[in-house]
């Protein structure tokens, strides 16, 4: 075999290995099982009473102002996973927190628990309030 032919074969083998490795890495990424929504999209879905608005902030944050009709389960509580596991997995959940981080992590956890319909409010309560959406204070 000529030297140039050997080099070409080695190059092709290298490319195949590289491609196989990148395909495997792509397969290893966890599938995102929720959809991010802006405040307008979130509010439209909230209008449907079969959808559950889930606020994963602390009780103190919730008391300072929350989306009307929302349910509060604190992401940071020790029994968060147990409380979430009790929920009806077939219902759509509109999940939010203060800025979007805890709600995205909540959606990831819920997705692993086989919840079917999950929606995350991008920007959280901050985006909700900035959009002029209704806020209820605990009495």
Image (spheres, rainbow, N blue to C red):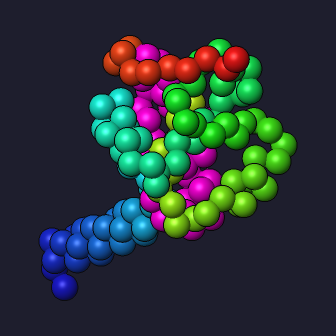
Q: Is residue 102 magenta?
A: yes
Q: Is residue 27 magenta?
A: no
Identify whether 103 is placed above or below 110.
above
The residue under the point 70% across, 40% down is 73
Q: Which residue lies furthest to the right in this view?
A: 78
Using the rendered view, name the quadrant where residue 123 is placed: top left
For the residue pair 113 and 59, the one nearer the viewer reads as 59
Q: Is residue 14 left or right of residue 81?
A: left
- Does any portion of residue 137 appear in the rendered image? yes
Query: Residue 18 in the image: x percent, y percent?
Result: 34, 65
The residue under the point 41% across, 32% down is 122
The residue under the point 57% across, 24% down is 66
User: What span is in magenta?
Assistant: 100-129
Q: Which residue lies furthest to the front in this view?
A: 139
For the residue pair 31 and 107, the one nearer the viewer reads as 107
Identify whether 77 is placed above or below 87.
above
- Does any portion of residue 29 appear in the rendered image? no
Quadrant occupied by the C terminus:
top right
Identify whether 84 is placed above or below 22.
above
Q: In this view, does 84 lie to the left or right of 15?
A: right
Quadrant occupied by the N terminus:
bottom left
Query: Residue 64 in the image: x percent, y percent?
Result: 65, 15
Using the rendered view, name the quadrant where residue 137 is placed: top right
């Amino acid at each position: 075999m000529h030297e140039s032919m050997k080099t070409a074969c080695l190059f092709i083998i290298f490319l195949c290995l590289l491609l196989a490795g990148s395909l495997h890495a792509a397969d290893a990424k966890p599938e995102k099982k929720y959809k991010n929504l802006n405040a307008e999209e979130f509010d439209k879905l909230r209008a449907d009473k079969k959808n559950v608005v889930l606020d994963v902030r602390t009780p103190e944050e919730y008391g300072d102002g929350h989306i009307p009709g929302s349910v509060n389960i604190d992401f940071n509580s020790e029994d968060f996973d147990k409380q979430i596991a009790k929920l009806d997995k077939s219902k759509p959940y509109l999940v939010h927190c203060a800025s979007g981080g805890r709600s995205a992590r909540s959606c990831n956890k819920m997705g692993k628990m086989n919840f079917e319909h999950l929606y995350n409010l991008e920007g959280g309560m901050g985006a909700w309030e900035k959009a002029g959406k209704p806020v209820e204070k605990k009495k």
